Image (cartoon, rainbow, N blue to C red):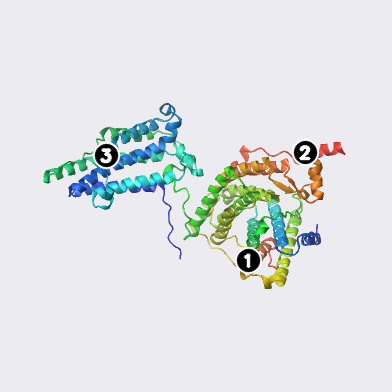
């Protein structure tokens, strides 16, 4: 599947969950799942990918801190390619999910930033830091604005 | 600048302190007379109290077996037989009649002796935190109390203290007589006869020479059951948090309401600790003659298994959310490791990492130590969740074959609902846990996934 197909999958998430934190949470989980699938293809284990999954785990914890009900939500959107997908497929998917989640965070900050507390904005800023860090580890380049 | 590292109090440390206090009491008795009758009474009482404390301590070590198994003498090593004889002898001494608690605050030999018995009792308290009032273990380390070979080091130390206490007896008696000659004393305190006792204690030492020893850490290195976090040094905080996560993981199989999210957090812990261990080992110069890959190999294998577990657990759901304490410790461990053993991003080679201090390397590698045990305990929890049909997975995440297996699964998929996790997915998780816990030899590989194909064809 190409990058475009993953963008369509992302659109489906936004349709179902809205463009709020719930959708961001789900996309980050999908990105982590794809990254885990990718790192399982390499038996020697790329620690870069593990660091990326750890950052994504922490990013979702930050979101759960902002909206505690997220941990009770049962979103498990299996967007990622199957376990037997190729390395390229997994990597493309993870990167696409990360880009979409960063885009959604930007939207949330623009539309709802005015009504957020400073702590919530700081939490989202930390999510951005962690997700961009994971992006850099996956792609080898910095997130372009 | 780093603060000095603190060491947690261990059982053996307190017994060593008691031994030092005894040595000091001996020196003081040798050097200076007992002064007043009150001090003489306090010294004799403190000496007797120390013997009583040692007896209580040995009794506590042997109580579980004495009550459960009367044929102890026949079944275990003769060291244990000698130790039980010693504890009987120590108990026969009895508690001092006029035990004055203020004796500990006076000076001289009486104070040192009183301090020694306080230290022996404090050591007993350290052990007592690991079991509840019925003797049931409260921590994963409580098993050390019940294995005669593991706790042998403590029995040896207590026998040594008994001998030390006996050696003091002669000086104590001489000083008492000296006092009686200098001034009229109405009732001279008596010193218990410990000749028989010391022979038995020496028997324990001799019997211990050929006693079976154990590779696992002994009782002397046991600390408090729930020590406070040491937060002044990153490596200390890391090991304390890992220890706490290990304790909680041990409790999980017996605890109600554990969600798969917590198991998933433990899997993330396995991934993170092993990834940082690999990164650290890669950044230090290899030891002479040992190929780096050979050192890395076990870490890589465990890392892969935990990645596998984490990937399989991520889509699973239970109604119970993650335990906040575990999550907080996991995040703290991640943040500490990111600081003390960073995995530099390949894209920013300018952020080079110097060679880490050896204490840091040790702490990072030690963090992976409890992971095999944790895998074993987590596997029990996932088995229970599955047996209770608590473990759900989104029906759409299943493949077509799996859906056609059961009609209600297909209906759930259409309605985008959750179904109990199919058995073969559980088999995969359980075999991954087994590999993480025991290594490749003890585990059988799961059956192939597409078992349902013939039944699909038959129905078609």
**Other-residue count near label 2 (Cα within 10 Å), few / some / many at <14 / 14–19 / ≥20:** few
Position above or below: B134 against A52: above
Closer to us: mark 3 or mark 2? 3
Determine the chain carrying the residue at label 1: A
C-alpha distance separating marks 3 and 2: 73 Å
- Residue picked out by circle 3: B166
Find numbered disc 2 in the image and state the secondary structure of the residue it sits on. helix
- Residue picked out by circle 2: B451
Q: Where is residue B409 in the image (x, y as percent from the top left)?
A: 79, 44
Q: Residue at x 67, y 63 (%)?
A: A131
Closer to us: mark 2 or mark 1? 1
Find numbered disc 1 in the image and state the secondary structure of the residue it sits on. helix
Determine the chain carrying the residue at label 3: B
Closer to us: mark 3 or mark 1? 1
Nearest the viewer among B312 and B257 is B257
Q: Which residue is drawn at 70% across and 70% down?
A: A112
Residue B375 visible in the shown view: yes
Position above or below: A67 against B142: below
The quadrant of the image that shows the N terminus of chain B is: bottom left
Determine the chain carrying the residue at label 2: B
């Amino acid at each position: 599947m190409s990058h475009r197909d993953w963008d369509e999958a992302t659109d489906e998430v936004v349709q179902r969950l809205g463009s709020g934190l719930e959708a961001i949470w789900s996309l980050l989980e999908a990105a982590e799942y794809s990254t885990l699938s990718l790192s399982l293809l390499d038996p020697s284990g790329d620690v870069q990918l593990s660091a990326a999954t750890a950052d994504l785990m922490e990013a979702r914890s930050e979101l759960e801190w902002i909206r505690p009900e997220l941990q009770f939500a049962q979103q498990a959107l299996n967007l990622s390619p199957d376990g037997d997908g190729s390395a390229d497929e997994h990597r493309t998917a993870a990167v696409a999910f990360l880009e979409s989640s960063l885009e959604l965070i930007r939207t949330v900050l623009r539309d709802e930033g005015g009504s957020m507390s400073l702590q919530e904005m700081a939490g989202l800023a930390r999510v951005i830091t962690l997700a961009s860090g994971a992006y850099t580890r996956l792609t080898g380049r910095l997130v372009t604005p | 600048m780093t603060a000095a590292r603190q060491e947690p109090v261990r059982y053996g440390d307190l017994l060593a302190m008691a031994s030092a206090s005894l040595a000091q009491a001996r020196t003081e008795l040798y050097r200076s007379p007992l002064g007043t009758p009150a001090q003489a009474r306090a010294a004799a009482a403190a000496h007797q109290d120390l013997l009583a404390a040692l007896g209580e301590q040995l009794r506590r070590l042997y109580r579980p077996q004495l009550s459960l198994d009367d044929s102890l003498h026949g079944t275990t090593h003769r060291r244990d037989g000698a130790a039980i004889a010693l504890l009987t002898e120590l108990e026969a001494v009895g508690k001092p009649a006029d035990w004055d608690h203020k004796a500990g605050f006076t000076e001289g030999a009486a104070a040192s002796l009183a301090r020694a018995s306080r230290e022996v009792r404090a050591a007993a308290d350290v052990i007592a935190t690991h079991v509840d009032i019925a003797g049931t273990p409260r921590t994963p380390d409580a098993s050390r109390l019940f294995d005669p070979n593991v706790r042998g080091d403590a029995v040896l130390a207590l026998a040594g203290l008994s001998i030390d206490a006996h050696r003091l007896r002669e000086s104590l008696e001489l000083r008492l007589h000296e006092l009686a000659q200098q001034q009229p004393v109405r009732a001279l305190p008596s010193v218990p006869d410990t000749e028989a006792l010391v022979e038995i204690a020496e028997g324990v030492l001799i019997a211990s020479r050929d006693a079976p020893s154990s590779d696992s850490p002994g009782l002397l290195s046991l600390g408090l059951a729930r020590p406070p976090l040491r937060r002044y040094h990153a490596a200390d905080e890391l090991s304390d948090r890992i220890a706490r996560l290990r304790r909680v993981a041990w409790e999980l199989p017996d605890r109600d309401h554990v969600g798969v999210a917590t198991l998933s957090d433990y899997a993330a812990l396995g991934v993170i600790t092993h990834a940082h261990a690999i990164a650290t080992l890669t950044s230090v110069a290899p030891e002479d003659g040992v190929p780096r890959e050979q050192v890395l190999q076990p870490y890589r294998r465990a890392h892969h298994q935990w990645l596998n577990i984490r990937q399989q657990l991520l889509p699973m759901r239970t109604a119970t959310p993650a335990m906040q304490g575990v999550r907080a410790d996991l995040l703290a461990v991640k943040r500490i490791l990111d600081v003390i053993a960073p995995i530099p991003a390949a894209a920013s080679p300018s952020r080079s990492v110097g060679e880490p201090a050896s204490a840091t390397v040790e702490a990072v590698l030690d963090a992976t130590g409890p992971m095999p045990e944790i895998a074993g305990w987590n596997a029990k929890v996932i088995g229970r969740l599955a047996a209770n049909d608590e473990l759900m997975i989104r029906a759409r995440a299943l493949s077509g074959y799996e859906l056609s297996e059961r009609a209600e699964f297909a209906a759930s998929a259409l309605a985008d609902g959750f179904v109990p996790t199919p058995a073969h997915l559980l088999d995969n998780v359980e075999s991954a846990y087994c590999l993480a816990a025991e290594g490749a030899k003890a585990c059988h590989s799961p059956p192939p996934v597409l078992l349902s194909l013939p039944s699909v064809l038959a129905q078609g």
